[in-house]
Image (cartoon, rainbow, N blue to C red):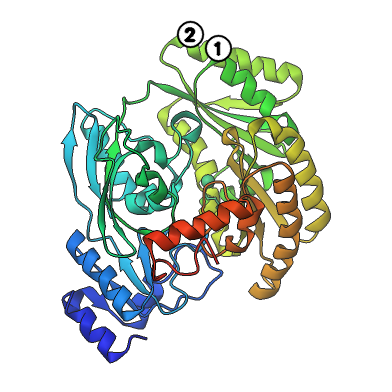
Amino acid sequence: MLTVSQLTSLQAILPVDRIHLDANMCKRYGQDWTRYTTPQAAAIVFPVSIEEVQALVRWANVAGVGIVPSGGRTGLSGGAVAAQGEVVVSLERMNRIDGFDPLARTVRCQAGVITAALQQFATDNGLYYPVDFASSGSSQIGGNIATNAGGIRVVRYGMTREWVAGLTVVTGSGEVLECNLGLAKNNTGYDFRHLFIGSEGTLGLVVEATMRLTDPPPATTVLLLALPRLEDIMAVFHAFRSALTLQAFEFFSDLALTHVLAAEHATAPLAERQPFYVLLELEAPTPDAEEQALQQFSRCMEQGWVTDGVLAQSQQQAKALWRLREGISAAITPFTPYKNDISVLVSQLPVFVTRLQALLTRDYPDFEVLWYGHIGDGNLHINVLKPVDWALADFQHACEQVNEQVFALVAEFAGSMSAEHGVGLLKRDYLAVTRSAADIALMRGVRAVFDPNGIMNPGKLLA
Ligand code: 2HG
Ligand code: ZN
């Protein structure tokens, strides 16, 4: 709750119809897709200009109120949750795309631009914005940048970081910084742009960005393959990648397939079920490439890595195969899954997954454990489903016990305890799995420079 004087000074910055205090709005905007924390926002505000964001940050410093920057709220680590009476600053009204530069192939976006709108803008201009994920219809560019979002084409195009040519930010102390000016070359010392990318709103707010666009991809071919053993997956990856350019290399387990088929009322894509499936999208600019794909498929069958497969015969079939992968997360949301989002070097994956499988089978005998993810990037999403008769707190506690073992294994393999979903609130206490004590101390120091009063997304990323 804001005090009367805090509210009065807030009302001097924004008109009352852009300050919301009612419980419904506070609940809706006070949380992201995470369901493990109770939202408790003091207010939701909707600035429409950089000047207003700056004024809000200055107000928060004086009033001593925390700010939670808010985009499409599709995050899965609690990074956009207001759990301790913060003011949520939603950037959704700042959603203009302009400043298209066809020669530089860049476009200026306000933070609240929806990912799909940027993708569409690029297409309308004969270009391509390649960062893509299931939530592209609601996630926003500012949030993508703050979390360095990844998704399904990282194996080909990298994370959001690769696509940010310039950034306008309001720091935690209320300064407006222009980072990198959209330039392709700019070697003038510390590049604050890269500090803000992935900073999860702890250094300030991203208010505008200059995004890079690229050539549209060539025609592609989509294949779904069935695998008896997870540890053979990287042999399949190697076979296809040596012969063709991969746009995506994703995987999911049969249990994940069962859930997505039930949720989407769809039928199994292959006659025979196997414990794991790989979904590949390959660049196929010529008929020769498709021939190559079939050759690699036969090779994988001969080796026994793959037992069955299907090659999409139309755009519609390709889309339907992709739904099987992209629909998983939404299909299991009703089961309040406990999520892990981990990665190791792809070269370590076969040994790592064998060890992880043994551990999860031993420690989660009573729960449904789903595997899926962007395996071509070494990124596994492990989701444990809550049995209906378990209380959320007990279930979380049980999962946290197993988490200790999972993260010990991740540390042993020098992997990441959050490959693409970010640290936020949910993974904050595990930061040391992947970052050294020296790293964490420097992160705190950096945070203090940009946000001396600790008003920016308090409690997230660093305790
Ligand atoms: C995906 O790859 C998303 O589908 C969500 O990153 C992952 O639900 C998850 O754990
Ligand atoms: Zn993912």
Q: Residue furthest top?
A: 288
As measured in the structure, the alpha-carbon distance from the residue carrying label 2 to the one carrying label 1 is 6 Å
Of residue 368 and residue 146, the one placed in the foreground of this image is 146
* Marks 2 & 1, CB-CB < 8 Å contact: yes
Tell me which residue sits at (73%, 25%) in the image. 305
Q: Image quadrant for the N terminus?
A: bottom left
> Which percent across, then down, holds residue 427?
59, 60
> Which percent across, then down, holds residue 115?
33, 46
Q: Residue 414 is drawn in which quadrant? A: top right
Tell me which residue sits at (33%, 35%) in the image. 129
Of residue 132 and residue 226, the one placed in the foreground of this image is 132
Amino acid at pointer 2: Asp
Q: Secondary structure at mark 2?
A: helix
> Which percent across, then down, holds residue 411?
71, 47
Task: Rate crowding at label 1 as few (under 14), some (14 to 19) or many (20 or more) other CA atoms within 10 Å.
Answer: some
> Which percent across, then down, holds residue 19?
24, 76
In the picture, the disc for residue 292 is: 1
Q: Residue 64 is drawn in which quadrant? A: bottom left
Q: Secondary structure at mark 1?
A: helix
Of residue 121 and residue 202, the one placed in the foreground of this image is 202
Residue 297 visible, this angle? yes
Q: Is residue 199 above or below residue 454?
A: above
Q: Residue 165 is drawn in which quadrant? A: top left
Confirm or reject: label 1 Cβ below 8 Å from ligand 1. no
Tell me which residue sits at (22%, 34%) in the image. 124
Amino acid at pointer 1: Gln
Residue position for label 2: 288
Task: Rate crowding at label 2 as few (under 14), some (14 to 19) or many (20 or more) other CA atoms within 10 Å.
Answer: few
Tell me which residue sits at (44%, 79%) in the image. 40
In the image, taking residue 123 as reference, residue 280 lies left or right, namely right
